[in-house]
Image (cartoon, rainbow, N blue to C red):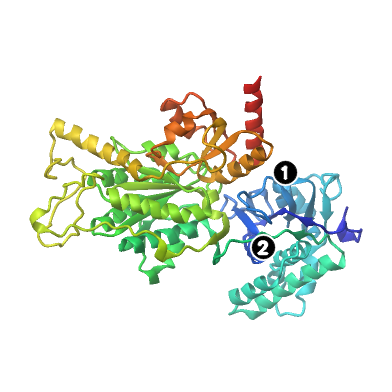
Amino acid sequence: MNIAEGSASPEGNTVETVVVRFAGDSGDGIQVIGSQLGLASAMSENDLGTFPEYPSEVRAPVGTTYGVSAYQVHFGGRPIKTIGDEADMLVALNPAALTTNLDILKKGGTVLVDAGTFSERNLEKAGYKASPLEDGTLDGYRVMAPDISKLTLESVADLSLNRKASLRCKNFWALGLVYWMYGRDRQPTIAWLNRKFAGNPDVAKANIAALNAGHAYGETVEATAQEVARIEPAPGIYSFVTGYEALAWGLATAAELANRKLVFSSYPITPASPLLHTLARLSDTGVTTFQAEDEIAATCAAIGASFTGGLGVTSSSGPGIALKQEAMSLAVSAELPLIIVNTQRAGPSTGMPTKTEQSDLNQALYGRHGESPLAVLAAGSPAECFEMAIEAARIALTYMTPVILLSDGFVANSSSPWILPDIDALPRINVANHTDAESFNPFERDPETLARSWAIPGTPGCEHRIGGIEKDYATGHISYEPENHQKMTDVRSGKIAGIAKTIPPLEPDQGPPEGDLAIVGWGSTYGPISRAVNNLRARNYRVSHIHLRHLRPFAPNQDELLAAFSYVLVPEMNTGQLAGLLRSEGFGNVESLSKMTGRPFQVSEIEEAVLSRLESSDE
């Protein structure tokens, strides 16, 4: 069916959820219109989840498959925890976008293409031998193929923009049509355009004109206008937040709760850099940011900030974390608080820097020289980034230890509504500096936490030296004694193990605390696992979901909880690193579900894996 040619459109109806995927060249403004659809959906009282996908090539040739950018939005009238397995609508602004994203569109779904870009040259770049609009490639889909480029030029003809600038508005033309089809309000986007281009009103007017023209086109051709069910939001004030924004705000909040100065030192790397960008905009709250000359310098600067009484934080992705490892071991030896944020990406080496993966768990647990234990946490959603940043700070400051906080490309770049917390209601992080010169010993330890004394340099009578050479347990002086090294090794290990005493007992996110099968996940597998378990439980399967936030040490009751299930399945975007860790601790009933495609798990993949194992066990 080709609505662009005037054929009749089906009657609109109310749907519970919708998945829309935008795709186009990296210069087509795909990320902009994707985020605007997310904002408009949030304003329409929909829950939602979004996920941008960027090309790995910095400047891929225009019109090639290597330069395709995408943005997926899942919105609707029930809690949204995933980006959606399949798209209901695909907007492909050139042939390359169509060929690289058509596999995500469900059969019978709607595909909107810009017929004006389907030239012989563009088809060749995308690998097509014939036009997919004519050779049957799109049979089984609802096809909308207006000449968006031409219609955009017509919609902005009265404004004083050249042809190139006018064509840049075609993304908003396509967005206007999507707004018509799903009943979105254009006013939030119009207000955003006026703010964004306040210094260039002609550009704002042109994009608004294109938005309105696309919306009017949908009404003229009677494109299906579907009503999307709304969700009843919980009381409170909401923000539309990405993972790295929530992480930045969480770190800043943690520093405020601890009455410490936050010093963030980093070196640019994809996909971790937006955390530095976001924190740099919080300088008015007392946050200090520093872009170092390399990864080692960034970590050492953060360690120095903690030595002077601040909260030192550094961040990177897998390759950069590898470079930070020597300095991380220094922080372990010096016993200073340090937060290391690892936004994981697909590897090894340069790998696929804009694609998501969970393959740095082993690196976080073991990636240092010597016996260098530290705490490891993981955030499972954009909203959870905020609370896990605060938890990382609590552990780092209370136990005087480095903490690795694992995120990944999916968690960091995806977004969702987030209810703003009451900062005044959050518990304080009370860690005092040592000021009593008469009783000062830099390695005197708290008997509960095993944390050593923390004195700010310059405190009269509390002058001290600290470094990476092994220290005497009692005095902190340099020591090469064998028995002392054994004792210091044991106390550093015992300090990390003792963190478990302050971790809340682990409980299933869904389902009973015992049964046939538990699906155990960590990090960004949270959403797909949660939805899969919800679906399976609705069909009366005895399945539970256990989500791990603390990976070293584990929650104190984790062993007992997992032992209460006949079978444990661990979906991970790696080759089974957590599953291997659990098996090494004596759990023989653990099996891995591995995926390494650069894309998150689909709900259906987890459901199928669970059903196949339950059926096998029944037999």
Where is the C terminus found, in terms of image quarters? top right
Mark 1 lies on residue: 103
- Mark 1 Cα shell of 10 Å, populated few (<14), some (14-19), many (≥20): few
Where residue 490 sits: x, y (%)? 23, 34
| Residue found 55% across the figure and 65% down from its top | 238
Q: Secondary structure at mark 1?
A: helix
Give whichever of 437, 195 is nearer the camera.
437
Q: CA distance from mark 1 to mark 2?
A: 25 Å
Residue located farthest toward the left when viewing the structure as drawn: 438
Three-letter amino acid code of the residue under disc 1: Asp
Residue 440 tag number: none
Q: Which mark is residue 41?
A: 2
Circles 1, 2 touching at the beta carbon (< 8 Å)? no
Where does residue 476 sit, x and y in percent of width and height? 14, 45
Q: Is residue 576 found left or right of 304 in the rendered image?
A: right
Is residue 258 shown above or below 582? below
| Residue 300: % across, % down | 29, 52
- Res 593 visible: no
Mark 1 or mark 2: whose residue is earlier in sequence? 2
Between disc 1 and disc 2, the foreground one is 2
Label 2 CA crowd tier, 10 Å (few <14, some 14–19, many 20+): many
